[in-house]
Amino acid sequence: MKIKRDVKTASIPTFSLSDVAFLLLIFIMLVSLINYRQEISIDFPEANTALRTNAEKNLEIWINLEGDLFLDGYPSDHLALERKIADLYINAPDTRVHILADRNTPYENINKVLEVLQLLQYRVVSFVVKNNE
């Protein structure tokens, strides 16, 4: 006995292709808006009064407990810090520099960063603290 088979050609439905493309576009737009800011784990010093800064673009200098230096979350050294500050001074002098140091960091490690800023005469500097209120 011979069994009859219906031979159908496979086809990809294209009526929903525009929906898939639209969802893919939304996904790409949302992923591109994510801020990939890297932070170093530090214990912020406290202050009774704190002033908020509204600068949109900041350079963050992180100093951890061991005195390691990080520029915007990436490991760095004092020579790279000098180059970055000099570049900021020339190209974007209104960029605010935020110094984020652990409360138990020895002052000489913070002073090295301040000496670089003083040498390059960069004056838009803030120390980041945790508000005590």
Image (cartoon, grey):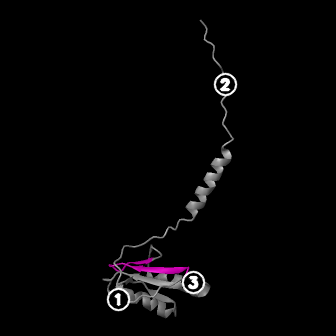
Q: Nearer the viewer, mark 3 or mark 2?
A: 2
> Which SS class for mark 3?
helix
Q: Residue at x 58, y 56 (%)?
A: 27
Q: Residue at x 57, y 83 (%)?
A: 87
Disc 2 residue crowd, few under 14, some 14–19, many 20+, Cα 10 Å? few
Compare residues 71 and 103 and report the one nearer the observer: 103
| Separation of marks 3 and 1 at Cα, in angstroms | 25 Å
Is 82 inside the magenta-drawn segment?
Answer: no
Residue type indicated by callout 1: Glu
> Which SS class for mark 1?
helix
Residue 131 occupies quadrant: bottom left
Is 69 inside the magenta-drawn segment?
Answer: yes
Disc 1 residue crowd, few under 14, some 14–19, many 20+, Cα 10 Å? few
Q: Earlier in the sequence, mark 3 or mark 2?
A: 2
Name the residue beneath numbered marker 3: 87
Residue 47 occupies quadrant: bottom left
Q: Is residue 117 left or right of residue 7?
A: left
Name the residue beneath numbered marker 1: 108
x, y percentage for residue 106?
Answer: 32, 86
- The total of numbered circles placed on residues is 3
Q: Earlier in the sequence, mark 3 or mark 1?
A: 3
Compare residues 7 and 67 and report the one nearer the observer: 7
Write down the region rendered in magenta.
Answer: 55-70
